[in-house]
Amino acid sequence: MDMRINPMQSQALSPTGAAAFKRPATGAADGVGTGFADNFKSALQSVSASQNKVAELQTELQMGNPNVSLEETMLAMQKAQIGFQATLNVRNRMVQAYTDIMNMSV
């Protein structure tokens, strides 16, 4: 189920003709962004990738790899932690917004 809010096109505003019942086109090809869900998904993948990189760096550091420094590992850990906290805050705000909308009286 696609729950993205799409901008209305001028044909969609027309009350007559078949264009009034067409769904507005979406996608990067027509100049419209990819949408919040796609952006959030890519952000989650980015956070997951940074956490995986940290796990690899920690393993390499523990194994005594001379090419991996403690400073690099600690910096990657902090970046992954900040990314995770930001993602968690976005998720919490989305849940709060959903709860607020569901509690609205109609």
Image: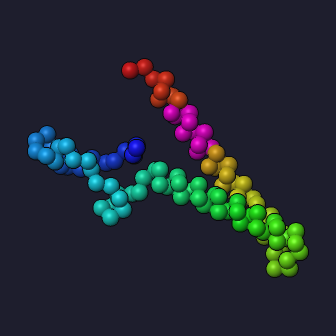
Q: Does the magenta stretch include residue 25?
A: no
Q: Give the range drawn in magenta.
A: 89-98
Report the number of discs.
0
With 3 as the anchor, is 46 left or right in this view? right
Q: In which quarter of the image is residue 69?
A: bottom right
Residue 39 x/y as whole percent: 49, 55
Q: Does the magenta stretch include residue 93?
A: yes
Q: Residue furthest bottom?
A: 67
Q: Is 101 drawn above or below residue 12 in the view shown?
A: above
Q: In the image shown, does 56 or 103 lie closer to the viewer?
A: 56
Q: Residue furthest left?
A: 16
Asked whether the viewer can see residue 76, the reply is no
With 35 as the anchor, is 45 left or right in this view? right
What residue is rendered at 89% in x and 75% in y? 64
Residue 30 x/y as whole percent: 30, 61
Q: Is 63 drawn above or below residue 96 in the view shown?
A: below
